[in-house]
Amino acid sequence: MVFYGSGENCHDETFFAYEMVGGKPEKVLYKAFLKKPRTLRDFQILDFPGGFIDGDDLGSAKAMAFRFRNNDYVMEELERYLKKGGLVKGTCNGFQLLVKVGILPGLDGDYKNNSMTLTYNDSGRFEDRWVDLEIEGEKCIWTKGMKRLELPVRHGEGKIVADEKTLGRVNKEGLIVGRYVGRNGEPHPGYPWNPNGSEDDIAMICDPTGHILGLMPHPEAYLKRTNHPRWTRENLPGKGLGLSFFNNGVQYARRN
């Protein structure tokens, strides 16, 4: 299921990515899902694409998160889906929605309470650039087999903030699956390599099951070598590295 509507604007690329790896995606309007969340039972993957839901009024994804959290039926169906091991990916605005609903980081299987947030970039402006990322651990099914890659970011509110206890747990439990690094892989690179000032240079996190991924960079924007800004100057593979996320998700769903 690929969500769309209410200002979200990356659904077509996301839909195409799943088709490229042999998936059978369907687009579902946010408004339709909120009225009939039982449709979730027909899917193995739930994808919240990026964009500007509700024009980012009240803050990124906050208005949509309010609609989710104040609909008991929706939250019950979501929790049922998550407890059964359903796969979820949220990119940029979709990541912000997952965090503000309470689905991520999902500590102790709690998918309803907020323990972190995403707020305004330290630069005080919208950041639109390609970043270098280091993938960590093997917990997350979406990032299996990945080590280093470049992806684009485009957001005004991408800084991950959490209290010391939560930040300590996501580090200790291996829930940080991607960090911003310098051009040559240097840790703690500072701005502009960390485009938003996110704590611990966090770019991606997963829940303890490894089934739910939230990330600020856009994998759906790097599906072919021609999407890369240096495709005429570097010997890049024909398939973009962003496609690996979708392939991992679809292959896992098929096996399970």
Image (cartoon, rainbow, N blue to C red):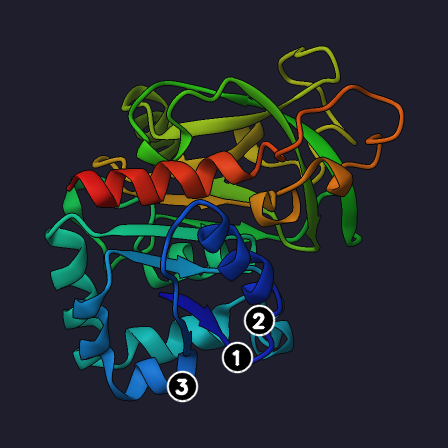
Residue 200 image offset from top left, x and y in percent: 53, 26
Rounded to the nearest angstrom, the CA distance separating label 3 from label 2 is: 12 Å
Any part of residue 162 in sight:
no
Quadrant position of residue 219: top right
Q: Decide: few, some or many residues near mark 2? Use Cα within 10 Å; few <14, some 14-19, many ≥20.
A: many
> The residue tagged with tag 1: helix, strand or loop?
loop
- Write down the residue under mark 2: 8
- Write down the residue under mark 1: 5
Quadrant position of residue 29: bottom left
Q: Is residue 219 left or right of residue 153?
A: left
Q: Amino acid at mark 2?
A: Glu
> The residue tagged with tag 3: helix, strand or loop?
helix
Q: Amino acid at mark 3?
A: Lys
| Cβ atoms under marks 1 and 2 closer than 8 Å | yes
| Cβ atoms under marks 3 and 2 closer than 8 Å | no
Please tell me which residue lies in front, 49 or 198: 49
- Write down the residue under mark 3: 31
Rounded to the nearest angstrom, the CA distance separating label 1 from label 2 is: 5 Å
Q: Quadrant of the N terminus?
A: bottom left
